[in-house]
Image (cartoon, coloured by chain):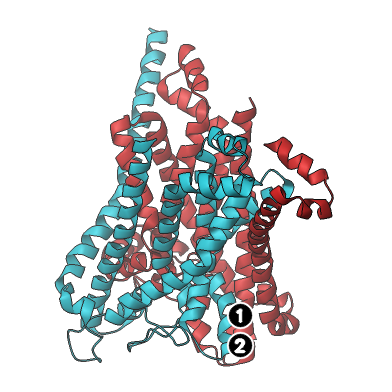
Chain colours: A red, B cyan
Amino acid sequence: MRKVETSSKKKSLFKKILSSSNVGDFIFERLTLLFAVSVFLLVILLGYEMYQGSKLSIEKFGWSFLVNSTWDPVREIYGALPIIYGTVVSAALALIIALPLSIGVAIYLSEVAPPWLEKPLSFLVELLAGIPSVIYGLWGIFVLVPWIRKVVEPYLSDKLGYLPFFKGAPYGFGLLAAVIILSVMVLPIISSISRDVLKSVPRSQREAALALGASKWQSTMIVLRDARPGILGATMLGLGRAIGETMAVTMVIGNRALISPSLFDPSYTMASVIANEFTEATSEMYLSALIELALVLFVITIIINALARLLVWSMDRKWKTT
Amino acid sequence: MNSKFFFYKKKITSFIMMSLTFVAALAAIIPLVLIFYYTISKGITYLNLDFFLAMPKPVGESGGGMANAIVGTLILIGLGGLIGVPVGIMTGTYLSEFGNNKFAYAVRFLTDVLSGIPSIVVGVVAYTMVVVPMKHFSALAGGIALGILMIPTITRTTEEMIKLVPHSLREAGLALGIPKWKTTLAIVLRTAWKGIATGVLLGLSRAAGETAPLLFTALGNRFWSTSIGQPIASLTVYIYDYARAPFEDWNQQAWTAALVLILLISVLSLLFRIITRSKYKTN
């Protein structure tokens, strides 16, 4: 098949179009290529459109947009620092909760579970990833937030209230609720990709470890070490998801641009600012600042996802070549 | 004695750690159970025929339904499909049939990256590209945003599914003197269509659950509208609005809308399961 292709490539364009048997092929290949190019252009178009839309704000604020901590639509001052802070902190804390659990789930699914249990469990974990985020948000507002307000926050402030992280009135809505809901949403992504990565480590690695007298846990640790780049990739995909998650976070985080160490205080993320304020943005500058936030979010998630994909791909290649 | 101690220590550590992974797996399922439990138990109270057939009632009047939102969601994912399905299938075909070059690797990489871009970002772009020139919110803008979001899923499933088609089938076609394009369309794509259809359904069902890209494109509409040039209602935006509203009655309806949305997605993924099952049986 490859030979047919390469030999046809050597012919001149003119001959190619003339020779009747190849006309269809020529058109078909170019047609599918056109669509592939359109996907390529689409990503560039996304970035370009947002750059155009945010020009006003970029020209006025420059880099101070990222380091200024005042977000004040009334005075037309837009500094995204508290929003970036909220985004980074909520995503990082969610990962800290979700990562050990996800790796546990991945190990259970790939190393421990009997086949009859593994299939339905994997299905359930994937189901968790398929729930629309607005339903997570709905559940967050009516179930999680009241529970946090009545049980979790009073308990934390009672036991650990001397720490700056657990100060303030227990509203329920705030960073803590967002972190919990994000960790639930990120878990299925990290665990299902990690499971695939663990499964891609050859059986012989485990057998060699067991043959040397390693316990099941010790052999699993060796498998984990082999799978490290892939798990890192999976974690970064989860990070990308946590940073870009919009609806569920907007519904529970309290939506106030505020830098505070306390998990009880309301916060804001880039995605939730856009979701919350975009339709209210009356002035051009306001809209432009919001589009710039979208652009920042776009660039960050592209970088994270690109690195993550490269890591996961490197795992695939590693075992395929050896 | 000493070696025996280490032996048991090793065994016990192993047992404890392996049990912990089981605990982690159970813990992961708990939120799923909770979410389903609340959605079903709270949503079922308003789940009646009216919910599917009637229009939303004004504030203060109880009852009413979300007929416009159910139809709106279907129209939106239909519009999205008009963009996402052809682009996804054609790109996937290109990647699997002609994709042995650097450009194809770049496209593959970009579709993967595209699938990780927050959906709200796509909503913002649909706003600047469609809503701003048209000067008002429209179903079209929402459909375009959903269509862009479907592309990665459909592209990658199409590519994977076409790759599963055995090479011998292609070679048989080519050996008979059938041109490559005809072989691809009539033999390869036809063999893989069930797999491709599952990718399309997966893309559609994910789009049905999207809210963020619709907030400032399709916007939402309290009245009956099927025009693609006008704002249109959708189940997800209704859930968002009704969940934050200060009315008990609306909050209840948000749960019902969530239940209906889950039912809609389940029907789509049930189709998906049925199609994949019959695929593996015939192979």
Secondary structure category for the residue under label 2: helix
Q: On screen, A100 above or below A280?
A: above
Which of the chains bears the disc numbered 1? B
The residue sitting at 78% across, 40% down in the picture is A7
Q: Which amino acid does label 2 sit on?
A: Pro
Q: What residue type is labelled 1?
A: Met
Q: Give me the disc on residue B46.
A: none
| Residue position for label 1 | B129
The residue sitting at 15% across, 74% down in the picture is B48
**Picture coordinates of residue A124, whole percent (x, y):** 32, 47
Q: On screen, A127 above or below A270?
A: above
Q: Which quadrant does the C terminus of chain A fall into?
A: top right
Can residue B132 be seen here? The reply is: yes
Q: On screen, B165 above or below B8?
A: below
The quarter of the picture where residue B225 lies is bottom left
- Relative horizontal placement of residue B223, taking residue B136 as reference (left or right): left
The residue sitting at 72% across, 42% down in the picture is A5
Q: Residues within 10 Å of mark 2 (few under 14, many from 20)?
A: few
| Residue position for label 2 | B133
- Relative horizontal placement of residue B65, taking residue A72 as reference (left or right): left
Question: Is there a contact, CB below 8 Å, between mark 2 and mark 1?
Answer: yes
Q: On screen, A277 above or below B113?
A: below
Secondary structure category for the residue under label 1: helix
The residue sitting at 28% across, 84% down in the picture is B246
**Picture coordinates of residue A89, whole percent (x, y):** 52, 62
- Relative horizontal placement of residue A164, taking residue A171 as reference (left or right): right
**Picture coordinates of residue B188, whole percent (x, y):** 53, 44
Mark 2 to mark 1: distance in Å?
7 Å
